[in-house]
Amino acid sequence: MPLKVYRARTMSEALAEVKKDLGADAVILHTRSFKTSGLLGLGSKNMVEITATDDEPTASKRTQRPARRTTERSATPAARSLSSAAASKAYGKPAAPVALSQSASTTPKFEPGFTSESDSAVALMEPPTPPSHPDRGISQPTQSVMPVAPSRQDKPPQDASLEDELHSIKRMIGRILSSSTSPSTAPGSMPDALFEHYLALTEQSVATEIADEIVGKVRDELSAAELADTEIVRETMLRQIAKLVPAAGDSPLPRRPADGRPLTIALIGPTGVGKTTTLAKLAAVAKLRHGRTVGLVTTDTYRIAAVEQLRTYADIIGLTLKVVSSPAEMRPSLEELSDCDVILIDTAGRSQHDGDRLCELRTYLDEADPHETHLVLSTTSAEAVMLRAAERFAELRPNRLILTKLDEAVNFGVLLSVTRKAEVKLSYVTTGQEVPDHIEAGRPDRISRLILSGPDA
């Protein structure tokens, strides 16, 4: 039996390719997830790989007629250890396959025999199930097998074919996830409506422990009847996800904090996350929408044309810009802007692996003593990169989080992991390059819709 490898960005796409190429009798031998390499760690993508093969030899498949397709299942654990001959002897009659009804025969048979993330796997081979009492038909499937859909003879052929396709993919996903999920989130242990939304979380790369936590809270909150309602489950899932997103709120900027100084806000973060553009957006919003007087300070004298870029924004918006080349120049520059309502400080991007540069950045922050320090992270970065950056920049004691480039993100599940790792409140998200339009307050309800529905939200 030749082995074939299929790769796709999601499990659903990969399974669809398997079924399209090998048909409904394919055997899944192995699955794994991996990340494609990107430039300098950026732009990497999550990929899924499935190794599959034909269920039967080619010659046998040519002679088999669709009308005589059968399904083999093991009735009891004891029957699994018996050979076909032994099984027939145990039941006192020949072991012959039992033909399914027309509705059951449309459900494809996938028998993946693998362990989660194993480098080698062997297809499970089970003896045919001896027929039960003639009046009862075939034995009932085990809990891990998705139930056979009712007869669809009254539906148009196209609708029935599409429904077969969806049931087949769902069944394959259920069997694969059942080998790697906890008992509480296995496909057979939760209602279909809840399982569909659980799959949506996994496709958005929500961490397994977080997805299990969300599903557990939904099951505790809803009754059995409510769990069968897709819309009720969806609204409850959105509400539980929103609870996991700490937000700073979207109240107007105060004119003066309690200490009498201008509201001082500093932006810190790795290189290339969009700090300067985000600072310009905040400055434009503060002046044009809230009517505040704004002053700008930049310490980014390392990046080529960084000062010129911010100066261009300042000239367009009509703001005063101060360039600070050393920590000793920070306080005098802030004093010159003491008449402003808001002072925004742009800092140079620092690698999360460069401890010396991070210490230097801390000296600037110590001199500025900002009221708010916003850690800026790009959602286009790999999850490991974002989590590492959040861990290292936590040493600078940020109390806010800004997530940029949501319009370029592949998935949004990492947002939950990052907000939990950073242990700070989400203040803003950016969704494009336009100043000042593509920035908005980080609202938990908005983030929850992105996580559950993806870019379509």
Image: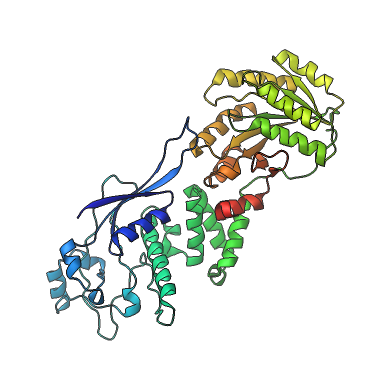
Q: Is residue 332 left or right of residue 44?
A: right
Task: Give residue 334's position: percent from left, percent from top.
Answer: 79, 21
Residue at 56% over, 55% down: 453
Task: Relative to 309, say whether 252 is above or below.
Answer: below
Q: In the rendered view, would you say 92 is above or below 287? A: below
Please name the residue shown 60% across and 43% down the image: 406
> What quarter of the picture does the C terminus occupy?
bottom right
| Res 102 → quadrant | bottom left
Residue 393 falls left or right of residue 192: right
**Depth check: 231 or 179 in front?**
231
Rendered location of residue 393, percent (x, y): 59, 29
In the rendered picture of this protein, how many numbered marks are placed on residues? 0
Q: Residue sitting at 17 percent across and 66 percent down?
A: 60
Residue 219 visible in the displayed image: yes
Which residue is depicted at the point 58% across and 19% down? 357
Q: Which corner quadrant holds the N terminus?
A: bottom left
Q: Position of residue 179 (x, y in %)?
A: 36, 55
Q: Is residue 174 above or below residue 252?
A: below
Res 191 visible: no
